[in-house]
Image: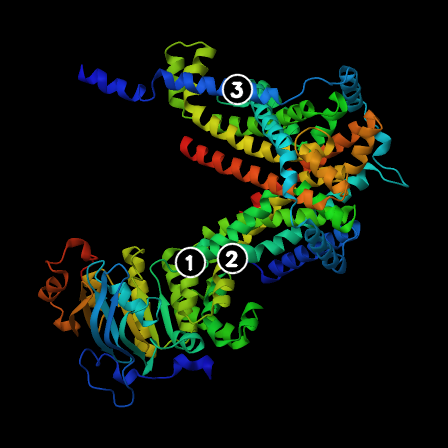
């Protein structure tokens, strides 16, 4: 059963319809809910300020904003890689803010994360990297002995197949190009069986061509499996091309939240506090 | 698919490594008469010994001031002597200074061979030659430092900037002028740092040379152990720790300032 | 005028007196150091003995290399290697938990790693020979005391090196594992261990090189290995035997250095 989770057409019926302000789903509640979330650093810097936000299943949300606006903090507070100081975050109705120990890890298990620097173990094989996404499903002893069940290995290989690098399964991760490494980390999130994928600047260290491949993979997975996806992006045109909903942050505050059609140049100028700069465009016109 | 290494080959390779490691461990355990029970009881015996060492007999501290001072003096002289003798060898062994392989290679081989002889062994030989006393200790420390410092020095000499050397050649300097104006200013701080580092090693070595009769505090360690005066032993051990700590600390600070 | 003063300032920062001061200090230091070393009582036979040793070195007692019945060179060297190998192996295993304890980047608070590092540095400060002497008192003379002494001393060394290796790793994979719901042990195992393993192996090999040198002298104080026949040969003034033992040690240490260096190069 677990082996075929991604074949299920779950959430697909709602795809692309649930941008901001969407009504509560007919069958499902919100996937991620920010309830007046704030983060103040010990030195007094405000990271996030009173964020009120609801993400529905199957959405492809892109977060934009200047660097330092709190995009990364927002994303990382969802799986509590960063702690918030006020408010509460609910994942599929369960509070991750209050969770400790095993319940926290179970919540994290449902959230895949993709990093700018891939965060793969470079000396391990691709397969082992993907399998490492499965550790939260098994006992510590079993994982330390490397005794992953057969289904897990198949799941991992299928996940690699979905991002077109199955033939690299037994290659060491550092033998791969940047784009391939990022696809391994997408496969890791897939094998994890995540309901949510968080991608923190997933293409910032990639060239334009691989950028497109990686973004396409993310989009395809979002559409095929209905995995709720939240992506931090620096490039405005990429955001417009892939998002169903765009969220704008400025100085830790939510300054824009709307469907991609509403994200006009003026809206971006508002988010950035100035007109869009050239290096905020990837420069591929309607690729 | 070409790049996929055979899983079987990797597995059997690591299995072979494990088997060899275990065989080596087992063989070593047999040779040294070690087994797990022995290990546990050994640690227990050590605990008993420690119990007998406390409290340290504080009055004994006065008696070891002199040998402690002598330990330091031996280290100072040994390091300096070793450094002085090392200098010409270093210039020979550094390939960017001596551009003649038939000179630098033999110099290197001599240095490498000398470095293989451990401190206590040197001391035993010098004691056999010159008799018991700190003089033998100084000489063994000198040879020890010579081995350590010459390698550190010629390696850092080889890492220097070629520009000034070329400049000296260009102005028509002879070999000695070339070294004095091109090499020395560049290596002086790092050489001093290495000298201090060698001094640290020498202080540690000097504390134990007395075990074979080459002067310093080590002799007293052996004596108190032989006479079962364990409370005096602990005083000596503490003194050794203190002197090594103090020297390491000051020398590290000085080296940080130099570099 | 102005350029000249600007140029002179750095040179004159310490002045001539500074140099003179340092010189006086150095002279005083050496005078003090020399005063502590007795130059009397040097054996009158020194020259003769030195010549005999040199003679022995060049006319080694080849018969000692292998003797079917007893304590010969090869067996002494084998014992030495065994002591070093076992001591280093035990130390490498014990050093791992210490390394996790003292690696600064794995802990929130500096006091945790600081305390681990302090313990390691305390262990390291004891010269292995002193440790060996204490162990000889505790468990009796022989190779076993040597193993224990080297084992303990190298926990201090390897623990420090391991911790430093761990401090240089990429913590990103650890974050990724945590994000996927792994517990701390799983995150360490999957993200940290694969990264540090080659470093640990290489450092252990390097430690083995050093411990072989240490093990050659342990026998001098009675802790087994080639040092024991050496000290007997020195005391009985059989210089050709001293010669062959020295030769054996030099060859063994050089070989081990070469072999370990080769293996370490392959690892990286």
Decide which of tag 2 and tag 1 comes sooner along the chain.
2
Q: Which residue is mark 1?
A: C109
Residue at the image point whose x is 23% and y is 86% from the top: A24
Determine which quarter of the picture holds residue B77: top right
- Whether marks 2 and 1 lie on the same chain: yes
Mark 1 — on which chain does it sit?
C
Label 3 and label 1: CA atoms lie apart by 48 Å
What's the mark number on residue B91? 3
Closer to the camera in the image, C141 or A126 = C141
Q: Is residue B2 visible?
A: no
Mark 2 — on which chain does it sit?
C
Report helix, strand or loop for mark 2. helix
Determine which quarter of the picture holds residue B88: top right
Marks 2, 1: nearer the viewer: 1
* Residue C17, x across and y down, in percent: 37, 17
* Residue C175, x across and y down, in percent: 40, 63
Q: Which residue is mark 2?
A: C101
In contact (CB < 8 Å): disc 3 and disc 2? no
* Residue B62, x across and y down, in percent: 63, 35
Q: Residue furthest right?
A: C69
């Amino acid at each position: 059963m677990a082996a075929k989770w991604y074949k299920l057409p779950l959430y697909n019926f709602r795809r692309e319809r649930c941008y901001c302000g969407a009504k509560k789903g007919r069958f499902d509640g919100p996937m991620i809910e920010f309830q007046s979330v704030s983060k103040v650093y010990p030195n007094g810097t405000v990271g996030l300020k009173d964020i009120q936000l609801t993400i529905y299943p199957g959405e492809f949300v892109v977060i934009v904003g200047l660097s330092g606006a709190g995009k990364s903090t927002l994303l990382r507070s969802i799986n509590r890689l960063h702690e918030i100081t006020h408010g509460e975050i609910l994942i599929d109705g369960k509070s991750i803010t209050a969770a400790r120990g095993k319940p926290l890890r179970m919540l994290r298990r449902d959230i895949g994360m993709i990093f700018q620097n891939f965060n793969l173990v470079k000396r391990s094989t691709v397969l082992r990297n993907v399998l490492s996404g499965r550790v939260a499903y098994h006992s510590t002893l079993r994982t330390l002995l490397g005794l992953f069940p057969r289904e897990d290995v198949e799941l991992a290989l299928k996940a690699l197949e979905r991002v077109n690098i199955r033939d690299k399964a037994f290659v060491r991760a550092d033998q791969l190009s940047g784009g391939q490494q990022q696809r391994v980390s997408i496969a890791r999130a897939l094998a994890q069986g995540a309901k949510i994928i968080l991608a923190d600047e997933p293409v910032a260290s990639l060239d334009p061509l691989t950028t497109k491949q990686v973004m396409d993979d993310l989009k395809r997975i979002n559409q095929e499996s209905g995995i709720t996806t939240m992506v931090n992006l620096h490039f405005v045109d990429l955001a417009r091309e892939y998002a169903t909903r765009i969220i704008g942050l400025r100085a830790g505050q939510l300054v824009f939240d709307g469907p991609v059609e509403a994200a006009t140049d003026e809206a971006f100028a508002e988010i950035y506090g100035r007109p869009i700069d050239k290096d905020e465009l990837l420069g591929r016109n309607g690729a | 698919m070409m790049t996929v290494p055979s899983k079987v080959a990797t597995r059997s390779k690591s299995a072979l490594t494990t088997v060899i490691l275990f065989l080596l461990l087992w063989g070593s355990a047999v040779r040294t008469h070690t087994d797990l029970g022995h290990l546990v009881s050994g640690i227990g015996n050590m605990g008993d010994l420690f119990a007998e060492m406390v409290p340290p007999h504080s009055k004994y501290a006065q008696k070891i001031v002199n040998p402690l001072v002598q330990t330091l003096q031996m280290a100072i002289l040994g390091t300096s002597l070793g450094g002085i003798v090392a200098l010409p060898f270093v210039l020979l062994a550094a390939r960017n200074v001596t551009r003649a392989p038939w000179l630098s290679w033999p110099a290197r081989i001599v240095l490498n061979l000398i470095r293989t002889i451990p401190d206590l062994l040197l001391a035993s030989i010098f004691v056999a030659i010159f008799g018991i006393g700190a003089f033998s200790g100084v000489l063994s420390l000198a040879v020890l430092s010579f081995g350590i410092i010459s390698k550190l020095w010629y390696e850092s000499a080889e890492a220097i900037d070629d520009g000034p050397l070329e400049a000296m050649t260009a102005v028509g300097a002879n070999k000695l002028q070339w070294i004095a104006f091109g090499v020395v200013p560049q290596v002086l701080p790092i050489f001093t740092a290495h000298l201090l580092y060698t001094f640290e090693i020498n202080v540690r070595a000097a504390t134990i040379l007395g075990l074979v009769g080459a002067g310093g505090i080590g002799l007293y360690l052996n004596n108190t152990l032989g006479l079962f005066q364990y409370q005096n032993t602990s005083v000596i051990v503490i003194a050794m720790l203190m002197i090594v700590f103090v020297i390491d600390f000051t020398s590290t600070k000085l080296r940080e300032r130099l570099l | 005028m102005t350029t000249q003063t600007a140029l002179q300032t750095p040179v004159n920062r310490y002045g001539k007196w500074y140099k003179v001061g340092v010189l006086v200090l150095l002279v005083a230091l050496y005078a003090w150091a020399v005063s502590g070393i007795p130059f009397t009582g040097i054996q009158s036979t020194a020259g003769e003995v030195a010549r005999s040793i040199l003679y022995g070195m060049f006319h080694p007692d080849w018969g000692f290399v292998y003797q079917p019945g007893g304590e010969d060179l090869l067996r002494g060297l084998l014992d030495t290697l065994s002591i070093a190998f076992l001591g280093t192996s035990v130390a490498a295993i014990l050093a791992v938990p210490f390394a996790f304890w003292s690696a600064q980047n794995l802990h929130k608070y500096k006091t945790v790693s600081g305390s681990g590092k302090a313990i390691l540095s305390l262990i390291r400060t004891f010269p292995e020979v002193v440790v060996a002497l204490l162990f000889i008192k505790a468990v009796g003379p022989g190779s076993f005391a040597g193993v224990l002494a080297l084992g303990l001393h190298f926990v201090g060394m390897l623990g420090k090196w391991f911790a430093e290796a761990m401090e240089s790793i990429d913590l990103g994979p650890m974050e990724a594992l945590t994000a996927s719901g792994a517990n701390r042990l799983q995150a360490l195992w999957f993200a940290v261990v694969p990264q540090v393993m080659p470093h640990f192996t290489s450092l252990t090999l390097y430690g083995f090189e050093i411990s072989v040198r240490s093990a050659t002298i342990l026998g001098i104080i009675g802790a087994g290995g080639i040092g024991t026949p050496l000290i007997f040969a020195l005391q009985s003034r059989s210089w050709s035997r001293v010669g062959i033992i020295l030769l054996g040690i030099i060859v063994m240490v050089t070989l081990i250095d070469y072999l370990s260096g080769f293996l370490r190069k392959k690892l990286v």
